[in-house]
Image (cartoon, helix red, strand yellow):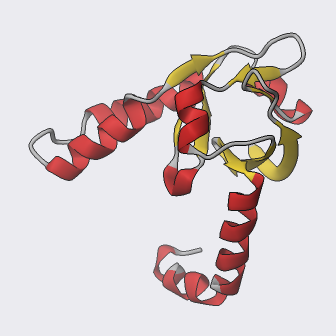
Amino acid sequence: MFIGEYQHNLDEKGRLAVPAKFRATLAKGAVVTRGLDNCLFVYTASEWEKLAVKLAALPINKANTRAFARFMLASAMDVQLDKQGRIILPEYLRQYAYLRKKSIVAGLYNHLEIWDEDTWNKYKKGTEKQSGKIAEALDGLGV
């Protein structure tokens, strides 16, 4: 399970250290892709397979489902941890997420999110202000 928030620096070659507590889970490889809200999603190979199967099963006759499948699948890249526990983030994904040096790695149960630190702080501040409204909207979901 991925949980927590960690600050790490992206180096000039696009390498980002994965928090030490997550390295064993990602040791067999991972997939990084565009996420929502201008962050990146990182999945273990098995979690990615589950998601990819669901995306591939979406009806191709609907424009929104085609667009979402393309958004997630076309940008996906297999990544491996190096000996220092880093992954290389491709340039096109770094540009999508506006990643500069300071980055945030956030654990969200079955995947990680990678954010530019400034973008994360703005997003988090806005979400914290709306937390009461968000909680009310989730009432019907049993949360």
Quadrant of image for the N terminus:
top right
10 vs 34, nearest the viewer? 10
- Residue at horizontal 16 percent and vertical 48 percent from the top: 63
Q: Quadrant of the C terminus?
A: bottom right
Q: Position of residue 14 (x, y in %)?
A: 72, 25
Most foreground residue, 44 or 93: 93
Residue depicted at 53% across the width and 83% down the height: 139
Q: Residue at x 69, y 49 (%)?
A: 115
Specify the quadrant of the image occupied by residue 88: top right
The picture places residue 93, in percent across and down from the top left corner, at 55, 34
Q: Seen in the image, is 36 located left or right of residue 28?
A: left
Q: Residue furthest left?
A: 61
As displayed, is residue 137 above or below residue 93?
below
Figure disc tally: 0
User: In percent of the image, x 76 and y 16: which residue is there?
Assistant: 81
Task: Tell which of 69 and 117 is nearer to you.
Answer: 117
The quadrant where residue 74 appears: top left
Tell me which corner region of the image, top left, top right, bottom left or bottom right, holds residue 54: top left
Left or right side of 126 for 104: right
Q: Position of residue 26 (x, y in %)?
A: 73, 23
**Does residue 92 lie above or below 140 as drawn?**
above
- Up/down of 99 relative to 129, above or below: above
Tell me where residue 34 appears, x and y as whole percent.
50, 40
Q: Is residue 119 visible?
A: yes
Whether residue 32 is visible to the viewer of this picture, yes or no, is no
